Amino acid sequence: MVSNQTNSQYPRPLTAREREWIDWILPQERAGYREYCDVVRSMSVIGEGRRGKGEIILGQIGAQPDFEEPLAPVFAYGAIETNFGPISITLREIVNDQISVEIVSHHADEVPADFEEFRRWTYSTWKPGDVCPQCQKPLREVPMHAVGGGGEYVVLAICTNDQRVWVYENATQVNRLIPVTNFYNELMLHKNVREPKIAFDSKRLFTDLSNYSDSDLTYAFVTYNKLKAKVHVEGLIVADKKEKRRLVEKLKGVFSRR
Ligand SMILES: [Zn+2]
């Protein structure tokens, strides 16, 4: 991997194309994306990411890309279908005032300079009631309401066709992708499934989805979110005493493993 420490092509502003694609997956009419977009606009491209060509790091001029932190979770994602195959844009959560942006062609080494665009889709414009932005098929939706909160709610969306899970946060109107393995793990703990053939095969979330009730999926989401704390809603779900105790034990287990 070539270091960009001495590379004079950084810092640089975003190219027009990079800016257009980033703006597209950060719709201004949604508070959460607008806020993030304001941060992007205060930044420059300070170097290439650790994943090499296609990943750029945004940050303040003078800063160097930080490779110490683990790769941040995805914040926004979009795909453009072209005559050269799909091009995807992935923006990750802001960590230490830096943002990883990946713009890659799925079928070529580089994103071609010119191409014919057939269609584009992003999770960022999805709202409850919509079909899947990727495959246009209906989704399993699990609405969750805040208890005693200010009318905040979140909706879990699951596409069995694309095997994707995300959550819509009403307060910010942001859709966050949820790692399937982590989510499924919480579901298996909750259902007390230990048989390895089932418990370790997270793809079964999609084939066995009808076996799980909204409250099972809610519980899995709440425990996942307690560990990852990505979605902040006051008084989201009130678990009964037994569940609270189990969660405390689970958390103890997580910390004692470290
Ligand atoms: Zn889909």
Image: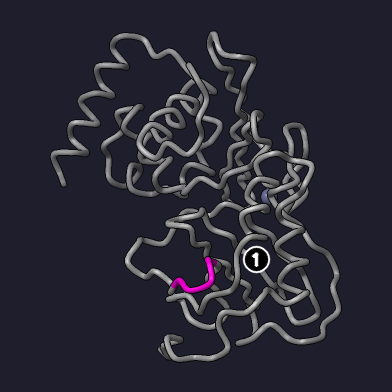
Q: Residue at x 67, y 60 (%)?
A: 41
Q: Main secondary structure of the magenta part?
A: loop
**Residue 246 shown in magenta:** no
Q: Which residues are magenta?
A: 59-63
Residue 44 drawn at (x, y percent): 60, 70
Q: In front: 48, or 203?
A: 48
Q: In which image quadrant can residue 252 be found?
A: top left
Q: In front: 51, or 98?
A: 98
Q: How is the image coloured?
A: one colour
At mark 1, the secondary structure is strand
| Image vertical order of residue 244 relative to residue 39, above or below | above
For disc 1, the marked residue is: 89
Left/right of residue 151 with respect to residue 8 in the rendered view: right
Counting labels gives: 1
Residue 244 drawn at (x, y percent): 30, 16
Residue 33 drawn at (x, y percent): 67, 46
| Image vertical order of residue 202 relative to residue 193, above or below | below
Q: Could you tell me which quadrant the N terminus lies in? A: bottom left
Q: Residue at x 31, y 32 (%)?
A: 189
Left/right of residue 5 with respect to residue 109 in the rendered view: left
Q: Residue at x 32, y 16 (%)?
A: 243
Q: Categorize mark 1 by other alpha carbons within 10 Å: few (<14), some (14-19), many (20+).
A: many
